[in-house]
Amino acid sequence: MKIYVDFSVFSSDGTAVGRVSGTVDLVAVPPLGSFLMLNQPRNGTMPKFIEGFTGRLRVTELQFQPSLEEVGVAASLEDVVVPSVEDARELMRFFQEAFGLSPDEYELGLF
């Protein structure tokens, strides 16, 4: 079952670095409070070990959209906080390479 997921990535100084979103294949809709394990990609990409990222992200919100399309469930996941902006960028690249998710890096330094 394809489920749309999204979550934000921050550096530990509070900088919002970006957002990651896209669809993942799961066997069922994960209940609120459960965890998605996103540290072991099946496509040969090596797992990332970055401080602040345990590989599991808690489901914080679910939305259901009645639809004839493939994806009718959206799951918001908890934010990820890593030590630096570069760590955040590396983690976002990992999600793109390992799971085909789309990173959306914010423009930093606008304020």
Image (cartoon, rainbow, N blue to C red):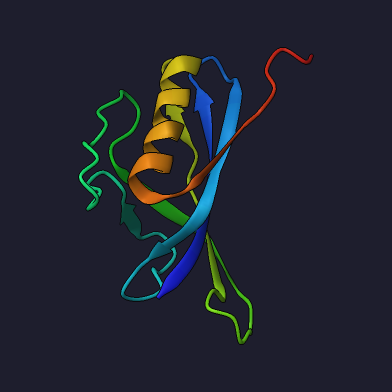
Left or right? Give the position of 46 relative to 85: left
Q: How many marks?
A: 0
Quick check: 21 above or below 50? Answer: below
Q: Residue at x 30, y 25 (%)?
A: 50
Q: Nearer the viewer, residue 94 or 35?
A: 94
- Residue 72 location (% of width, % of height): 57, 76
Furthest residue in direction right, as rendered: 111
Q: Is residue 76 visible?
A: no
On the image, the x and y values in percent for residue 74 come to 55, 65
- Asked whether, in this view, residue 62 is left or right of residue 54, the answer is right
Tell me what residue is drawn at x 57 percent, y 39 percent: 19
Tell me the quarter of the image containing the N terminus: bottom left
Residue 15 appears in view: yes
Task: Find residue 53 and report its horizontal and vertical position in percent.
Answer: 33, 33
> Image point 42% across, 50% down: which residue?
100
Q: Looking at the image, which is closer to me, 18 or 77?
A: 18
- Tell me what residue is drawn at x 33 percent, y 55 percent: 35
The vertical placement of 80 against 23, above or below, is above
Q: Dividing the image into 4 quarters, which one contains the C terminus?
A: top right
In the drawing, does residue 98 fall left or right of residue 78? left
Counting from the top left corner in percent of width and height, residue 31 is at 40, 69
Q: In the rendered image, which quarter is residue 32 located in?
A: bottom left
